[in-house]
Image (cartoon, helix red, strand yellow):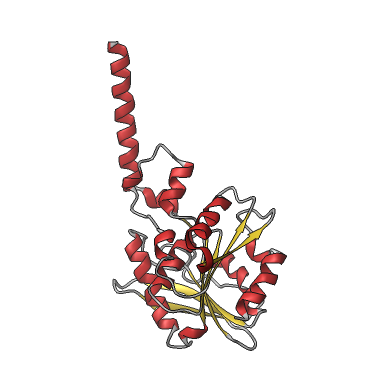
Amino acid sequence: MKKLIGLLKIVLVLYTVLCIALFLFQEKFIFFPEKLEKNHQFHFEQKFEELNFETSDGKVLNGLLFKADSTKGLIFYLHGNSGSLNSWGNVAETYTSLNYDVFILDYRSYGKSEGEISSQKQLFEDNQLIYNKLKQSYSEKNIVILGYSIGSGMASKLASENKPNQLILQAPYYSLTDLVQQRFAFIPTFILKYKFETNEYLKICEMPITLFHGTRDNVINYESSVRLKDDFKNKVTLITLKGQGHNGITDNNYYIEELKNILRK
């Protein structure tokens, strides 16, 4: 019995240490930025402009604005949790070909953007800052917010506090808390600093909302979108991409066809 109690104590200590480490360093487990040198030159086939924005705490955020030949409006694209604009810029062509300009932001510590991510409040404030700047060049009624993967929660939050024309989510999670529970049930959710409660943000959104999700997504389960659709019924349109995994949604032919219809609204 003493050996069993001793073993349980060791397990408890190790578990406690693990939880403390996850709390202190959870950014390392959620965000996987690719860093680029300040003098890095981007190369894409379509026209683009490199833009920089200063945050309230003096950090510079870097983004790319891709221009359509004849624009109907702007798509503000919030990308996934890895990489940088060096690769994310490749998604722009799908949208510029449909006559929409596209702005893609690198979050703090990604690409040429300065600073480090330290809270979801900080991320939300950065996204709102950029949105306000974009509204100086585009009428809000012509802005579409689009979020992919980790960006879907941030896009939902941004849309809930503004009045864009539409909100489009690719491979969204119900909430980041729910996603962590699905994948790592042993982690207590109260230690999460990043909750990204998509299900709560969508309650406030008043614009059309479209979800795209692949049935073979092994990162964020398709059922996450089904739950969001069930919660919001007629408020949300769910478009199922049969056989689609987590990556490559923007290049999916069915996605592009449905996107054409959505952007006509």
Q: Residue at 50% of width from left, 58% of height from top?
A: 228
Camera-side residue of 225 and 5: 225
The image quadrant of residue 10 is top left
Q: Residue furthest right?
A: 253
Residue 160 x %, y %:
40, 71
Residue 117 x %, y %:
37, 60
Which quadrant is the C terminus positioned in? bottom right
Left or right: 248, with 147 as reference point: right
In this view of the protein, can residue 170 be seen by the observer? yes
Q: Residue at 48% of width from left, 75% of height from top?
A: 207
Which quadrant is the N terminus positioned in? top left
Left or right: 106, with 69 as reference point: left
Q: Residue at 61% of width from left, 75% of height from top?
A: 262
Please determine whether, in this image, residue 42 is positioned above or below residue 191.
below
Camera-side residue of 161 and 42: 161
Q: Residue furthest front?
A: 234
The image quadrant of residue 244 is bottom right
